[in-house]
Amino acid sequence: MTTLRDLADERFVSLTTHRRSGEGVPTPVWVVPDGVDGAAVWTPAGSGKVKRLRRDERVTLRPCDRRGRVADDAPTVEARAGVSTEPSDLDRVEGLLRAKYRLEFRIVGLVERIARRGRGAERAVVAIRPA
């Protein structure tokens, strides 16, 4: 059986959050192990997934490629997620992402800063725990 911690070691996961209607909205994200059995991602604080998670903490994770394509036989993990904008959480998860994604993390950050004319996006941590 695949665990949340197993998926936290993947390069990308498809994180599915839920609209009010119950419809799932999958998004490919970077993911890092966080704590003993959890995982974390970070995202712009005003993103749709953050808004959806403030209403419904249910999430589904599946391994995917950078474009969000999920193999038919990919394992699925059901979990719960919460959102934090606490500086200590942001710093911790940023450090974990830097360590895992290295140069790729820096390049994406540079592209974001250029696109935003020097201003970084306000971020939120999505802390994911077993259901």
Image (spheres, grey):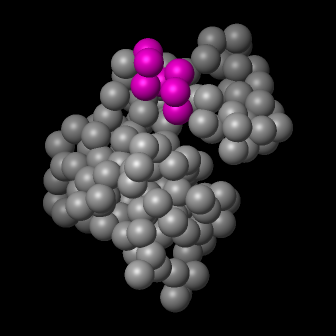
Q: Position of residue 16 (x, y in %)?
A: 38, 60
Q: Which residue, as the protein is rendered here, is positioned at the far front?
A: 36
Dominant SS of magenta comes to helix
98 lies left or right of 22 = right
**Nearer to me, 91 or 27:** 91
Is 90 within the magenta? yes
Rendered residue at 52%/27% (across/down): 92
Q: Where is residue 79 in the image (x, y as percent from the top left)?
A: 30, 60
89 lies left or right of 71 = left
Which residues, given as a range, are shown in magenta?
Answer: 87-93
Q: Where is 131 relative to 101, above or below?
A: below
Rendered residue at 42%/69% (across/down): 3
Residue 50 in view (yes/no) = yes
- Identify the image quadrant of residue 83: top left
Rendered residue at 80%/33% (across/down): 107
Q: Position of residue 74 (x, y in %)?
A: 51, 81
Q: Where is 121 relative to 53, above or below?
A: above
Q: Where is residue 65 in the image (x, y as percent from the top left)?
A: 65, 66
Q: Where is 30 relative to 66, above or below?
A: above
Considering the image in quadrants, where does the N terminus appear? bottom left
Q: How many labels does the image show?
A: 0
Is 14 within the magenta? no
Considering the image in quadrants, where does the C terminus appear? bottom left
